[in-house]
Image: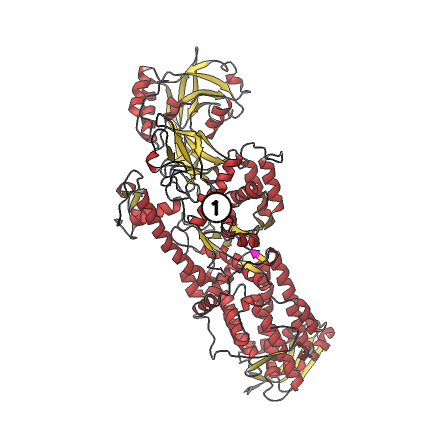
Amino acid sequence: MTENASIVAAVNAPDRVSLDGLETKWGAVWEENGTYTYEPTSRENTYSIDTPPPTVSGSLHVGHVFSYTHTDVIARYKRMTGKHVFYPMGWDDNGLPTERRVQNYYGVRCDPSLPYEPDFVPPHDGGDGKSIKYADQKPISRRNFIELCWKLTAEDEAQFEHLWRTLGLSIDWKQNYQTIGAKAQKVAQAAFLRNLDRGEAYQAQAPGLWDVTFQTAVAQAELEAREYPGAYHKIAFHGAGEDVVIETTRPELLPACVALIAHPDDERYQHLFGTTVTSPVFGVELPVLAHPAAEKDKGAGIAMCCTFGDLTDVQWWRELSLPMRSILNRDGRILPETPDWIAAPEGVALYEEMAGKTIFSSRKAVVEKLAETGEMIGEPVTTQRMTNFFEKGDKPLEIVTSRQWYIRNGGRPYTEANGRDLQANLLEAGTELEFYPDFMRVRYENWTRGLNTDWLISRQRFFGVPIPVWYAVDESGDPDYSRVIVPTEDQLPVDPSSDVPAGFTEDQRGVPGGFVGEVDIMDTWATSSMSPQIATGWLTDEKLFEATYPMDLRPQGQDIIRTWLFSSMVRAHLEFGGLPWKSAAISGWILDPDRKKMSKSKGNVVTPMGLLEKHSSDGVRYWAASARLGTDAAFEENQMKIGRRLAIKLLNASKFALTMGGDTVEFNPAKIVLDIDRAMIAKVARVVGEATEAFEAYDHTRALEVTESAFWSFCDDYLELVKDRAYNRDGLFTAEQSESARAALALSVDAFVRLLAPVLPYAAEEVWSWYAEGSVHRASWPVPAPLEKAAGGADESLLGIAGEALAALRRVKSENKVSQRTTYASVVMMAPEAQHEQINAVLHDLRQAAHVRGPLDIVAGDSIAVAQYELDPAPAKN
């Protein structure tokens, strides 16, 4: 409705209002009418959202409902302000989570050496797949495995979409993508090839973090520090005339030792710098060196450097130009062949005993031998140490040397075309992005400054976006990784494991003078980091891209600032030299009753569909919208109950207010003539202004707070106060007085319905349908000016005084435990003299609302209260 002119509308409210079934009813209408469909328009008229693509690996939990509701509330608000909202949905279905779920669900694992089996039927189809041990999972070909990945993700995506639709997300379901889909692959591969062409992507044979369970390299952003049980072993190295005792938790790495290192200022070891020692049992001669990263106050203050036990070893190895003596294979077992640097007979014998064994078994063998030779001093001392884990893994990461692909991200010095270091440019870009709340910006800055390596993007997995390169095979039949063969962009997407590069034929694969395809896939973040470009149609839909990019909003969780947000900033900076979006809205976490973050890995999540059915989607959305961005919130069903009650009240109060004039309602500001009615409109105008200001600042919680407070006041005070005048069944009021109340009620309800529509979309749409055409979610957002004009400068405080007076009259009946319909024979009410005029202005409404049939006198007092009264035992007739 409009506040500017008179409109008479028919009211078609049902006999009985209910929230039940509204999700199904309005979901179908929205879909049929294309209510949320985006049609490309000019960039300035578009509001574009980079919706987080949820990981399709099982089920959504209530934390997803929490954060995605925040985004939807903003999308609905922006749509009502006249913006064409581009609100797509993506599915993050590639990478490790999907593979792991497929393994557990179907009881299979991928073995690329096996041939494809047509019409393959997996040994399991759901059930208790998690109980199937890795060794019992049926090996199948890569193609069969990927087919199962596609099958399961399609089923999961359908379930996810059903839940999102039930929740009422105003997604344009015609705008969607999969991070493993052809569109996403084309974008991710094209961006990579451009990175490669500019020197921003490169491959290197280098030590890197490795998960022995999942058999894949792990990037810095995927690390998780956890405590892990271990033991310190005091081990004697033999020098000229003295033994040097070190303490280590990794005695199994003794054969990989390349030096002993102490701090250059440590007086205990000054005389040893520049000398050599020999390792116990293995008898390898090693230098004693100085490096400032050695910790004087840790253990003996001198440490063995092995290739590699931890990241400090990598630093020492690189900065001190130490030899490479790796003994650990990718499967976490000791390499089978005895290294040529071990010559001592005892060392050779011990290594042969270790060969092919796990780290644990090898450690046991070394410790037993050191105890036997007397080179271990005392017994091991147990300890808990912090070590790096893959965030999805359950074993400590090892450091393995391998060939991997990297993209520059500022972790290592890199000068860009503008002559500035990449890290400095990324930090500057962070200052240009609007963070909501702003304190989240420091997380981006700290991560950017703290990086110490470039972004490792290659993964030794199967279901993902292939790295789009081949390598020439030399005349000896070995891949020459320095001779990279790339496709053209019009050939993308490609899969080098099955596609053939231009100028070659399939029979040249793997033969001298031919080619081999890259078998690794991209890290999932290497694709997800391109979500702004994938969603907006870069390289696939030029018209859409021009209308939607750079995007307006990136909504996301705080825990992936270091991964998704940062990597997206890197890719947009490298390719476009600018931000991918104007603003980032960061949601907090959902906490369980023990104040712990809810997550699938902790097993403390709550699935949402039952909550939506129990409390209604509007009720659950209210709980989510009650939490501010960046703030952790407790999982609280009581808040959902409050939300459901608010939605029901919106239905009931709206029906009550809109039908007081019969089957039609008139929206006519000119008919609002009484001060109390104008005061109500003045209050609505103020609330509209405050809610709008809050929404513009991405403070949806404040917008809800001011709206909800005003709405309950409207229901409990104003509606109760003026309902008799609006009905005017007994003709006690003039037509002008009655119409004034009805007009104020109609305009107030219309404003509240629109103000609450972003949070309570189903109840708001239901009420809107009773008196207006189209959808409230395509209606205009209310503005203060016409409401202020209708209020005519009225004093909003009159509402509060009238409400206090009505509450005082009600309180007497409550205390006497009689019905509110009981009449007063007489009343004497106290009030400060300054408020007498205002109370007298609403005296007629007060008498009718409180059923005062006799005198109602106002006398001086410190506060508004009933001083004397006489109740009539007969209840009011109306």
Q: Which residue: 30% across, 28% down?
A: 356
Element type at marker 1?
helix
Question: In the picture shown, does residue 424 fall above or below 580?
Answer: above
Q: Position of residue 780 (x, y in %)?
A: 60, 67
Q: Position of residue 696 (x, y in %)?
A: 62, 58
- Specify the quadrant that holds the N terminus: bottom right
Q: Let me know if residue 50 is in the magenta part.
A: yes
Q: Quadrant of residue 871?
A: bottom right
Asked whether residue 525 appears in the rendered view, the answer is: no
- Specify the quadrant that holds the C terminus: bottom right
Q: Which residue: 30% across, 40% down?
A: 111
Amino acid tagged 1: Val
Q: Let me know if residue 621 is in the magenta part.
A: no
Question: In the picture shown, does residue 726 fall above or below 686?
Answer: below
The overriding secondary structure of the stretch rendered in magenta is loop
| Residue farthest front in this picture | 503
**Is 229 displayed left or right of 4 in the figure?**
left
How crowded pointer 1 is (Cα within 10 Å; few <14, some 14-19, many 20+) is rated as many
Q: Which residue is mark 1?
A: 187
The magenta stretch is: 47-60
